[in-house]
Image (spheres, rainbow, N blue to C red):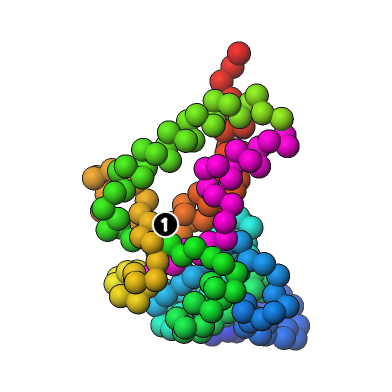
Amino acid sequence: MNKMCGLQNSDGVQAVAEVDMPKFANLSDANTTSLQRLLVLERLQDPGNLGTLLRTAVALGWDACFLLPGCCDPFNDKALKAGRGAAFKLPTAKGKWDELLHVMHRHDMQCYGASPERSDTAAFAQQLEAKHAVLARQLSDLPQSSTKEAQDEVVGSNAMCIVLGSEGQGLSKTALEHSTPLAIPMTDRMESLNVSQAGAILMFAFCGNSLKLYDQVKRPH
C-alpha cells in the first residue's frame, strides 16, 4: 500500500475500484471539435509540475494538452496527486513536433513559446498594461453582453497554443523556430519562475476571464 500511494505512511485502504486508463486523444482527428486554447509541454520531467499544470488548465477552461517527447507520464502517481485527477478530465495528446504542427494547422492556431529571452518584453508589457487599464475603467459601464468583446480586445479571440519547456533547459531549438517568444514581465529582483507558476500566469492571462477580476475589485463611489 505504501508503494502504491507513494507515501511512507499511508492511511490504509479507502476504496477498491477498477479504473480504465484514458487513451491519449487524437487532436487532429476530423471529429475533434475546434480547439481555442492548447497547452503544450516539452521535455517536462517533473511529475509535480506536470500535474499542477494539468490541474490549472482544467480550472481555467483550457481545451487540451499536448505532450512532446521527453515529458513524464501524466499518470505517474506524483503527477496524479498534484493534478487532483486533472489527467482524467483534460484531453491529452502525445506526439512529436510534426504531429503538433498538424494539429496547429488543423485548428488554425497561433503558437507562443514561454521564453525569458523576448527582447521587447518591457514594451509588450506596457502595451498590455495600458489596454488593461483603459478597459478596466470602462468595464463597470459595459453591459454584460459587451464584456466578451472587451476581453477579446485584450487577449485576442484567435486559437492559440502556449509551449512550456524543460525546467532546466527551457525550450528546444525546434520549439523556438515554430513559436513566437512570450515572456512574463518581472522585476530584476527575481531571475525566473517555476514552470508551473509561469504556466499558470500565462494560461490565466489568455483564458478570457482575466478582466473579471477587475469587476470584483471596484473602487467605492
Task: Tell which of 17 and 164 is nearer to you.
Answer: 164
Label 1 neighbour load within 10 Å: few <14, some 14-19, many 20+: some
Quarter of the image that includes the C terminus: top right
The residue at 35%/77% (across/down) is 174
- Residue 194 shows in this picture: no
Report the residue that reaches farthest toward the top: 221
Q: Quadrant of residue 33?
A: bottom right
Task: Say which element carries label 1.
Answer: helix
- Residue 50 in the image: x percent, y percent? 49, 70
- Residue 139 in the image: x percent, y percent? 61, 29
The residue under label 1 is which amino acid type?
Ala
Report the residue that reaches farthest toward the left: 188
**Is residue 151 a member of the stretch shown in magenta?**
yes
Q: In this view, does 25 lie above or below 36?
A: below
- Residue 46 in the image: x percent, y percent? 42, 74
Q: What stretch is highlighted in magenta?
A: 144-165
User: According to the image, label 1 marks what residue?
Assistant: 198
Using residue 203 as the reference point, say whether residue 167 is left or right of it: left
The residue at 46%/72% (across/down) is 41
The residue at 68%/36% (across/down) is 146
**Is residue 30 a member of the stretch shown in magenta?**
no
- Residue 31 in the image: x percent, y percent? 73, 78
Q: Is residue 34 above or below residue 183?
A: below
Q: In which quarter of the image is residue 20?
A: bottom right
The residue at 32%/42% (across/down) is 123
Quarter of the image that includes the N terminus: bottom right
- Residue 167 shows in this picture: yes
Numbered-mark total? 1
Q: In this view, does 120 lie above or below 1?
A: above
Task: Tell which of 156 and 197 is nearer to you.
Answer: 156
Q: Quadrant of residue 218?
A: top right
